[in-house]
Image: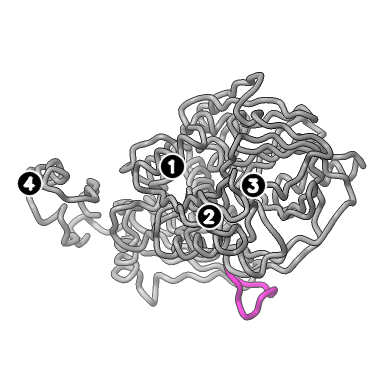
Amino acid sequence: MKFRNFLEVLTEENEVNEVSEKVSPVLQAGALGAKNVELDGPAMHFKNLEGYPNASLVTGLYASPSDLYPKRRKAWIRTNVALERELEGTYEELQEHIYDGLEQGGLKPLEVSSGPCKENVKLDDQVDLNEFPFPLIHEQDGGKYSTQHVIIVEDPENGVISWSDERFMIKDRNLLVVNLDPEGRLYEIYQKYVKLNKPMPFAVAIGVDSSIPLATAVFMERVGLGGLKREVPAADLAGYLGGEPIELVKTQTNGLLVPASSEIILEGVAIPGETALEGPYPNFYRIEKATWQPIFTVKAISHRTNPIIPFDVTGIKGSDSMSLRSWAHSFKIYRILNSWWWGTKIARWVYCPVSMRMGMGIVAVNALYPGFEFHFSRIVFAYSHWFDKLMLVDNALGAEELARVMQDFIQKASPVHAFHFSKDDVAAITRSAKYPNDGERTGRLYINACLDPTWPKEMIPTRVSFETTWPVALQEKIITNWSKMGFVNKPQKRLINA
């Protein structure tokens, strides 16, 4: 789905609040977006920007409503819209859709000769990033930022095209300072250019087709594991997820292919050794100090008339970046687990809740044998760099209501037998937590809130619930007529003892 169509559909579904009052891109837009996400509000489209009559800002396009209590709006509702799926689609269906996209190799993009992103082209001395309302989002930020985009580069060794979403700060009219993750693909590719002492061509696409941000997040998680014949490029996966090929067009100066319908395209080179301070800027749980990062020099800008710039209020629970990273990392663990046991699907779903800032992983698991949970947890922790706390629940539970997950935690997790700590033999998680002994070795914790798989059926208690306490025929009648009776939040069918 094209970016502007995505925005229109979200607006029709009352998932966008169009703000007509004059708003400053310096702090005010970021503050409004932050409070709005905290209150589970819809996305916000700032259409009357102070000092920028021909551009607008939008935030919260992928942000998640809270998932800790039953509600009308699922945490992944905007992602369902982005992928043109049913609004009421379940979390499990979302994970299966991504799974199928990788298994089938994605959908090849189409190269086109031009596109909406070419409506206005500026080269060399015409380039001025200050013409666009890149916001100063937080008071402590080191400068104005772009926080929702795709950075496109080519690996000089094998020609593989990498898409990633690292933030960047506006340094000057034609200079960006990009925050490179030492564990990320962009960092690895940049270091290859440094060793070759060659400039690295790059392109940045801002305001892209709605399936691209999730596909990029999955690509960044290196999900090409578990029997894939080849790693699926982000553009191919985005095409499959969105149901149509992504149209790509060549940049003006370096020949990289970029999404043709983008709002803005920046292109240029990164010269090895040219660095500047980037930051301070928040991550998911604390404000990072300024660090020296590579300078990317912009040689050309292409953009649509009256461009709309999406941005992420980073660090706020449920923000766009946190939600996308949650779906992508959860799916990575889901795919690995279900590729591990010889084709047996042992995980019904995996979820790193944004309500917990991704500090805990929850897995609905099919325990195959006594002691299975121990082996299972070791695999999860081996592949997760986001959380050091894991809860295992019975696969009868769905991901829609974390309140039921917490109920099982309370009722099934014995304080004596269910809490399992590893020794202080691993590095501390730094992406989602900070402990008083930061920097020291630490451990991992998994909580077993599953029923004992050796129990005979008659020993398993039946939960008092809608599914277990009323006749099946009456249940089906009520669910079928739910909307006709004027109720919202149509209930999902659960497994019998969920």
Report crowding for label 4: few under 14, some 14 to 19, many 20 or more residues within 10 A (C-alpha).
few
Q: Residue at x 55, y 49 (%)?
A: 57
Judged by depth in the image, the label closer to the viewer, 4 or 2, is: 4
Against 228, residue 330 (above or below) is below
Residue 376 highlighted magenta (yes or no) = no
Coordinates of residue 209 in the picture (x, y in percent):
54, 35
Query: Residue tagged by mark 4?
Result: 474
Q: Is residue 196 toward the left or the right of residue 239 in the image? A: right
- The image shows residue 336 at horizontal and vertical percentages of 53, 45
Residue at point 76% right, 60% down? 278
Mark 3 or mark 2: name the one nearer the start of the chain. 3
Q: Name the spot of residue 227 as percent of width and height, x first.
A: 56, 34
Q: CA distance from mark 4 to mark 3?
A: 49 Å
In-front residue for pair 342/281: 281
- Relative to 161, residue 87 above or below: below
Residue contact at pointers 4 and 2, CB within 8 angstroms: no
Q: Nearer the viewer, mark 3 or mark 1?
A: 3
Q: Nearer the viewer, residue 110 or 337?
A: 110
Residue sticking out furthest to the top: 113
Q: Quadrant of residue 127?
A: top right
Q: Earlier in the sequence, mark 3 or mark 1?
A: 1
- Local crowd at mark 2 within 10 Å, few (<14), some, or many (≥20)? many
Q: CA distance from mark 1 to mark 4?
A: 31 Å
Residue with the mark numbered 2: 380
Position of 98 relative to 138 (above/below) = above
Label 3 element class? loop
- The three-letter code of the residue at mark 4 reads Leu
Comes first in the chain, label 2 or label 1: 1
First along the sequence among labels 1 and 4: 1
Left or right: where does residue 174 sit relative to residue 478? right
Residue matched to label 1: 95
Span colored in magenta: 433-442
